[in-house]
Amino acid sequence: MSYKALALQLTCQSVNSCQTRDEAEVLMLQTIDRIERQIAASIGLIGRDTLLVVVPEFFLSGLPIDETVDQWRDKAALDIDGRIYEALSAMVQRQQIYFSGNVYEQDPFFPELYFQTSFIIGPNGDVLLRYRRLNAMFTPTPHDVWELYLDAYGYDSLFPVAKTNIGNLACIASEDILYPEVARCLTMRGAEVFLHSTSEIGSPLMTPKNIAKQARAIENMAYVVSANSAGIVGNSLPSGTTDGRSKIIDAKGIVLVEAAYGESIVANADIDLAALREFRQRPAIGNILARQRLELYADSYAKHSIYPPDTLLSQPAERTHFMRTQQDVIKKLYS
């Protein structure tokens, strides 16, 4: 099977200036309307075989700048069953696509926090998976409430893979692309296409994330569909700080297509599942997946802990806490 994927590079409207949740949700609903018009026009131009659309990190809200965790949760973190998800579901059903993005999201098990969540919605409007970002500097993660998170959801929830008629899809959020273990754990659960919602410097240079995208594709013999923003407007940061270079990379690490700057549908390309699966099943020196010797590394991982789990079980999720924890980790690493 072959179909088109689109990494839709769009401008993110932040909600930083909003004073209430209702005000923020009005802006989000307007963003969803604008995105639907862009998706419909894109499909009309590049073809009805466009079955997968990935949008950037922060596409509905921007990111917290001066807000505390409490303020951002109350204003910008979505309810799992709220009207924003309902609007996204309705949009996806009308357009008959698979749709992936990244949002801030509340969780009933952790009412004092929020998580940064990548999701996939299928053509029937159902949320097929939720992937919570696992590595973040100032955002709460499952690892920060590790024991309680595992009790609530179990270990496999950390690495969800949706098996669909357009392939086995998995999300990687933002900086998680820099951690090879994340992609490898998803691949071990069957992932074939990584959906990467990001918000990063759009540079023609080989930035760490640009290197990582190609490396993850090669290491895991998988496609990477990476959607970056076309800037973020409505907060105090220069709008072009994160702009451009959305791309699609094939299982050999070849960049099939790459956008420049500004809102764009240039990053669209064919996903050839039959070729991918044949490539993975071919005995050869280049079949990296079939040559993995995981027992070599298991003991080293089991015996070492670097960034501690559960730090938010006894501390509030404030920026000073995250900075202090990292400083303690650095001291431990180099003492």
Image (cartoon, helix red, strand yellow):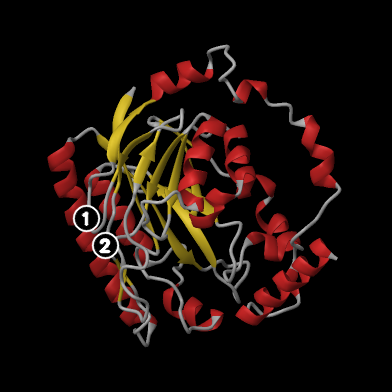
Classify mark 2: helix, strand or loop.
helix
The residue positioned 22% from the left and 52% from the top of the image is: 264
Secondary structure of residue under mark 1: helix
| Whether residue 68 is situated above or below residue 121 in the rendered picture | below
Q: Quadrant of the N terminus?
A: top left
Q: Which residue is mark 1?
A: 36
Amino acid type of the residue that numbered disc 2 sits on in the rendered structure: Ile
Residue 34 drawn above or below residue 304: below
Q: Position of residue 293 (x, y in %)?
A: 73, 26
Q: Is residue 71 visible?
A: yes
- Name the kind of residue labelled 1 in the image: Glu
**Residue 295 left/right relative to 78:** right
Q: Which residue is mark 2?
A: 32
Q: Position of residue 132 (x, y in %)?
A: 55, 56
- Residue 195 vs 139, above or below: the answer is above
User: From where the camera sits, is residue 126 visible?
Assistant: no
Q: How many marks?
A: 2
- The residue lying toward the viewer, choosing from 326 and 147, is 326
Q: Which disc is residue 118 wearing?
A: none
Residue 212 pos. (x, y %)? 52, 45
Query: Where is residue 326 shown, x and y percent of the image?
Result: 70, 70
C-alpha separation, residue under disc 1 versus residue under disc 2: 6 Å
From this viewpoint, which residue is outermost toward the bottom? 19
Tell whether 216 sits left or right of 235: right
Outermost residue toward the top? 283
Which residue is painted at 50% across and 59% down in the image? 117
The residue at the point 40 percent across, 64 percent down is 58
In this view, the residue in front, 119 or 22, is 119
